[in-house]
Amino acid sequence: MTVPSFTVPSLFLAVPLTAYLAFVSPWLGRRQYDRLARRRADDPRALVRAYRIWIGEEWAWIAVTALILALSPDAGLRDLGFIRPDDFGKVAVMTAGLGGALLAGSLVLRHASRSGRAVPGQEAVAALLPRTPAERWHAVAMAVTAGVCEEVIYRGLLIALGVGVLGLNPSVAAVLALAVFVAGHLYQGWRGMAGVALLGLWFTAMYLATDSLLLPIVAHVLIDVRGLVFVPAPPPEKVGHAA
């Protein structure tokens, strides 16, 4: 991994963005989720509006990231993981792991559907699960947005800032970035955040092993599509916040 160089003007954007992601976004996300859980039963457009807000917010992060790079001539897309992985052996191992994870998830969903049991982890995101075609299309857009934007920000940008600005070892920078990523899922409660931590650790391992965001982005999108679109939504009366 190269050591990117960020200019002082770019840090006037990077520092507030990092602070927002670490402290404001978790608190705000939990409030938004709780509001959605309360309103969804009585407001058929509540989920669509929430998805649109979150999609817009995450692409706004990307816009800020683009400005940070524009203000730092010695830092480029390569420093954020936009390169093709060179070690195809590692790519093959990571791809096999992704396929296994998706297969295992599909088997769990199938078993839960046949037995009538709740899908593990469903309660943490119950208010986000779509029921109508419009909600499902927005859920797909949310999954793609999260897969792209969150990997670019939490893996690409934050690790690059840790290495290039703070002089941290890439692994240490990755751990700190992972902590911010997990905090951003505060709305899921502690059990949900534990699952997010495991997934985030896997995405981080993919990135550090290949120096590329390609596989983490693909994995993140596919897992979010499975988790949002293909998990049966619970009845409206069971939608609520998981503590």
Image (cartoon, rainbow, N blue to C red):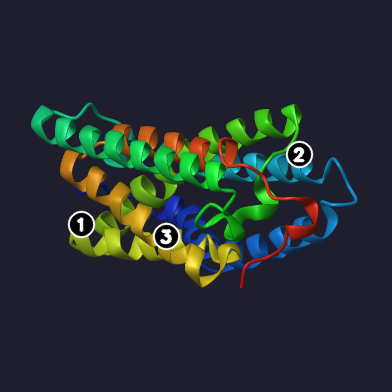
Q: Residues within 10 Å of mark 2 (few under 14, many from 20)?
A: some
Q: Callout 3, which amino acid?
A: Gly
Name the quadrant containing residue 114: top right
Q: CA distance from mark 2 to mark 1?
A: 38 Å
- Badge 1 amino acid: Pro
Residue at image mark 1: 170
* First along the sequence among labels 2 and 1: 2
Count all numbered tags in the image, as a single digit: 3
Q: Of the residues tagged 1 and 3, which is closer to the observer?
A: 3
In the displayed structure image, the side of residue 161 where residue 232 appears, left or right: right
Whole-percent x and y of residue 105?
Answer: 41, 43
Mark 1 falls on what kind of element? helix
Question: Image quadrant for the N terminus?
Answer: top left
Q: Which mark is residue 113?
A: none
User: In the image, is residue 186 above or below residue 98?
Assistant: below
Q: Is residue 142 left or right of residue 33?
A: left
In which quadrant of the rendered view does residue 210 lie? top left
Assign the C terminus to one quadrant of the image: bottom right
Amino acid type of the residue that numbered disc 2 sits on in the rendered structure: Val
Which disc number belongs to residue 195?
Answer: 3
Identify the disc placed on residue 48. 2
**Image height of 237 relative to 213, above or below:** below
